[in-house]
Amino acid sequence: MQLSANLAITIVGIICCLWIALNHQNLKNQYGFLEGHAQTLMAILLLAIVMEGARRMIGWPLLTVAALMLAYGLFGKHIPGEFGHSGTPLGSFLGTLTVAEGGIWGSLIGVSIGVVSVFVTFGAVLNAGEAGQGFMNVANAAAGRLRGGAAKVSVLSSALFGSISGSASDNVASTGAVTLPAMTKLGYLKRLAAAVEAVASSGGQIMPPLMGAGAFVMVELTGVPYTDIMFAAILPAILFFVAVWLGIDSYATRYDLKEVPADQRPHRRDVIVTSAFFAIPFTVLLVAMFACKYTPQYSAALAIFVGLIALLFNGKTGLDLKLGFERLGTACLNAGRQIAMIGSIIICASIVIGVLGIIGLGVKLTSFIVSGSGGLFWPSLRLTTLAFLLLGMEVPITAAEVICVSGAGPALIYLGLEPL
């Protein structure tokens, strides 16, 4: 039953997308207006499929935000006062979201397909091999012998792993599977171990070079090159992890947190060998981007090929083709899941932005922020921060960024803040 429903949704979605792709020239001449009941039905089906995808990959919060925004676009004309709107014909409203470039086919989707998916694949390839173990070994060798060493290993490994995953949940699942048992085994409080891993893994989302989908959305929204975004993120990321490190060190002094026992630390050979599994692909990526001046996505593609070769090797026994093909399958599945999740997030966020553009609510939000802060910069920044905090409790970081920036971004730029 479930398989049949999934297959039906897939077929309907593919047919609708193919029809739009094959008829895009004619649809351009419609200027975002739907013609006939068949096109209206197609638009409704596409929006329903997109939102069902978001529900499956993310959960109800993001779906609820997108649904409320669609409802506001359709029925907000009945709301009196400043935050009501004059209304838009149904054919124009749905057409702008589904066959024009104002919704699910917007520029953010192009970024998701053309850039984000390549870097996500790069992270999945490295994670499927021994790069993750390499991160753990390097972190253990560097911090394991220090006071509160097990917690500090968690911080370093999360920072390193975050640089290729850009996902807090993946970071916890990968590094946490090792660091959480290690901390509790040494007598650390379970709530402390969980807090350290959660906070450190969250910081991995701003650790270059990958930084998750949010970084690539910044590129599209600000027009700033990806390499500049990467450089801008280095200092905040370092400061974040330094702050976490200092907090752990203070806690370790007060509660006498133990270091990692010598017999549980990796041997020097293991550190050198496993670190090559991430150091070589990283070097290829950075050299291609900064020395050869290739585009970020082309550089990541080159690094992916190097990472694929690394999948064929075992750090202990050398070449292992059987293991390599198993890892390749894991990498493909993980990349597919991550791309589907990021695609769902960005498409739902694009729907919200599309509705904001259709009904002009973005301009009203900008005016509200400026007037609510008395035209002053710091109060406007605090209002924006509050909006991010509230939305961030419900939806993923990328969606929160896109939705908030679309309303608050113009206000902050108007008050003198640089786009980056």
Image (spheres, rainbow, N blue to C red):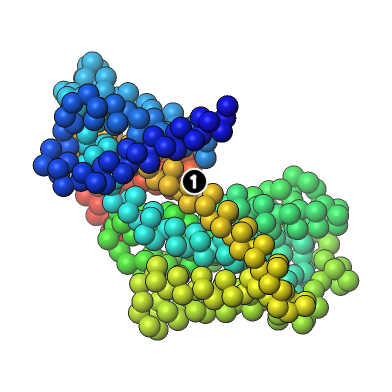
Q: Is residue 96 visible?
A: yes
The residue type indicated by label 1 comes to Met
Q: Position of residue 340 (x, y in %)?
A: 48, 47
Label 1, on which residue?
A: 341
Q: Is residue 248 shown left or right of residue 233?
A: right
Which residue is rendered at x = 27% and y = 37% of the image?
A: 98
Which residue is rendered at x = 35% and y = 34% of the image?
A: 46
Q: Position of residue 284 (x, y in %)?
A: 49, 79
Q: How many marks overall?
A: 1
Q: Nearer the viewer, residue 225 or 404?
A: 225
Q: Is residue 203 shown left or right of residue 99?
A: right
Q: Is residue 161 visible?
A: no
Q: Position of residue 328 (x, y in %)?
A: 61, 63
Q: Nearer the viewer, residue 251 or 17?
A: 17
Q: Position of residue 25 (x, y in %)?
A: 16, 47
Local crowd size for mark 1, using a 10 Å CA cut-off: few (<14), some (14–19), many (≥20): some
Q: Quadrant of the N terminus?
A: top right
